[in-house]
Image (cartoon, rainbow, N blue to C red):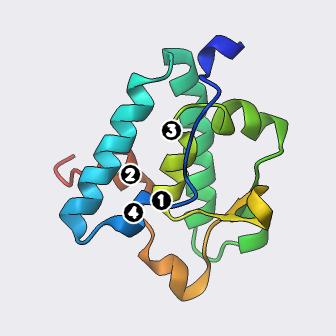
């Protein structure tokens, strides 16, 4: 992949849009808007490579009995994460709406564990844009 796959990413995920939702319908709308923004502002190759990484991160973080330090923390300085998530428009927003939160002074994203993590979105639900009919 080259730098034209990415837009330099203004991801704004510090304030998770999902936390602004008042009900499930609002949350579904927010997810739909974020996914559309992700698709509209990235090249097909960036969408594919970022989508694979995002799917893996979400699956690992939401597995039952997952070690939160191993699978629930994303180091934003990791070169692969930089290329396929941080620099891809909207990718951090997708992680934010799925439940990841900024940690470590902005150098990491963490997935809440325990009771905090129980309200997270299912990764399949997220990629379907919240539409239960799929």
Q: Secondary structure at mark 2?
A: helix
Of label 1 and label 4, which has the lower sequence position?
4
Q: Residue 110 got which mark?
A: none
Q: Residue 90 got which mark?
A: 3
Q: Secondary structure at mark 4?
A: helix
Q: Position of residue 54 (x, y in %)?
A: 58, 44
Please report contact status of discs 2 and 1: CB closer than 8 Å, yes or no: yes
**Farthest bottom residue in view:** 115
Q: Position of residue 126 (x, y in %)?
A: 38, 51
Residue under label 4, please give it: 18
Of label 4 and label 2, which has the lower sequence position?
4
Of label 2 and label 1, which has the lower sequence position?
1
Residue 121's quadrant in the figure? bottom left
Which residue is depicted at the point 58% across and 62% down? Answer: 100
Residue under label 2, please give it: 126
CA distance for labels 3 and 2:
14 Å
Residue under label 1, please give it: 98
Q: Position of residue 11 (x, y in %)?
A: 56, 42
Of label 3 and label 4, which has the lower sequence position?
4
CA distance for labels 3 and 4:
14 Å
Q: Secondary structure at mark 1?
A: helix
Residue 52's quadrant in the figure? top right
């Amino acid at each position: 992949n080259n730098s034209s796959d990415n837009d330099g990413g203004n991801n704004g995920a510090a304030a998770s849009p999902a936390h602004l939702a008042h009900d499930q319908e609002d949350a579904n709308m927010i997810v739909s808007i974020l996914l559309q923004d992700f698709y509209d502002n990235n090249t097909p190759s960036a969408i594919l490579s970022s989508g694979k990484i995002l799917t893996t991160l979400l699956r690992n973080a939401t597995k039952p009995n997952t070690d939160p330090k191993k699978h629930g923390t994303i180091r934003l300085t990791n070169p692969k994460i930089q290329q396929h998530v941080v620099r891809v428009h909207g990718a951090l927003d997708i992680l934010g709406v799925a439940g990841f939160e900024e940690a470590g002074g902005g150098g990491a994203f963490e997935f809440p564990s325990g009771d905090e993590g129980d309200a997270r979105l299912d990764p399949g639900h997220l990629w379907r844009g919240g539409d239960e009919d799929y």
